[in-house]
Image: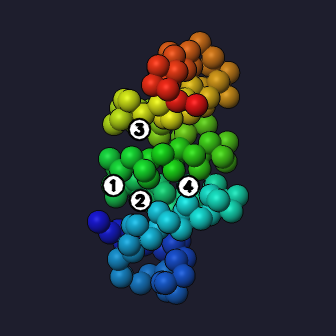
Amino acid sequence: MTYQPDELDLHPADPHPADPRPVDLHSEFLRADLLLAMGQPAAASRILQRVVDAEPTNEAALELLARAYFGSAQLARSEDALTRLVHLAPANGWARRALARTLERQSRGPEAVPHHRMADALGAE
């Protein structure tokens, strides 16, 4: 699936922001993963949000988006992405643990407890 870059998207392969050529979502996912690894979670989240908008059931993109939001302290957005991921993949222990930690960072410890329990039951670290 592809999406059209918006006028703010300065992708290296598209030197002209208004260029109508479609952008490869997989390449954008990899670019966002690299940005996250380089310590730029806010930049990664902007790219990943467009990927998730184009493929709302892509679990890998949702997970990376949640990590990017968490890493840039956008906790409400991280919670939203993780909640969507838990609904898509209820047996994903990592998502349960990450959702619990996101809730805890928002001082919502009691809401985190059932997610920690489920993560423990699923064998998540």
Q: Earlier in the sequence, mark 4 or mark 1?
A: 4
Q: CA distance from mark 1 to mark 3?
A: 13 Å
Residue 85 numbered tag:
3
Q: Check the image and name the residue furthest to the right.
A: 39
- Are the two marked residues, 1 and 3, in contact with CB atoms closer than 8 angstroms? no
**Does residue 73 sit above or below 34 in this rendering?**
above
In x, y percent, where is residue 84? 40, 36
- In what element is the residue under mark 2? helix
- Are the two marked residues, 2 and 1, in contact with CB atoms closer than 8 angstroms? yes
In x, y percent, where is residue 69? 59, 46
In x, y percent, where is residue 8? 53, 71
Q: Which residue is depicted at the point 65% across and 59% down?
A: 37
Q: Which residue is depicted at the point 62% across and 42% down?
A: 70
- In what element is the residue under mark 4? helix
Amino acid type at mark 4 = Ser
Q: Which residue is mark 1?
A: 55
- In what element is the residue under mark 3? helix
Q: Quadrant of residue 85?
A: top left
Q: Which residue is depicted at the point 62% across and 19% down?
A: 108
Residue 42 numbered tag:
none
Q: Earlier in the sequence, mark 2 or mark 3?
A: 2
Question: Which quarter of the image is occupied by the N terminus?
Answer: bottom left
Q: Within 10 angstroms of label 2, few (less than 14), some, or many (20 or more) residues?
A: many
Q: Earlier in the sequence, mark 2 or mark 4?
A: 4
Q: CA distance from mark 4 to mark 1?
A: 15 Å
Q: Which residue is mark 4?
A: 45
Q: Which residue is mark 2?
A: 51
In x, y percent, where is residue 41? 64, 55
Amino acid type at mark 1 = Glu
Q: Earlier in the sequence, mark 1 or mark 3?
A: 1
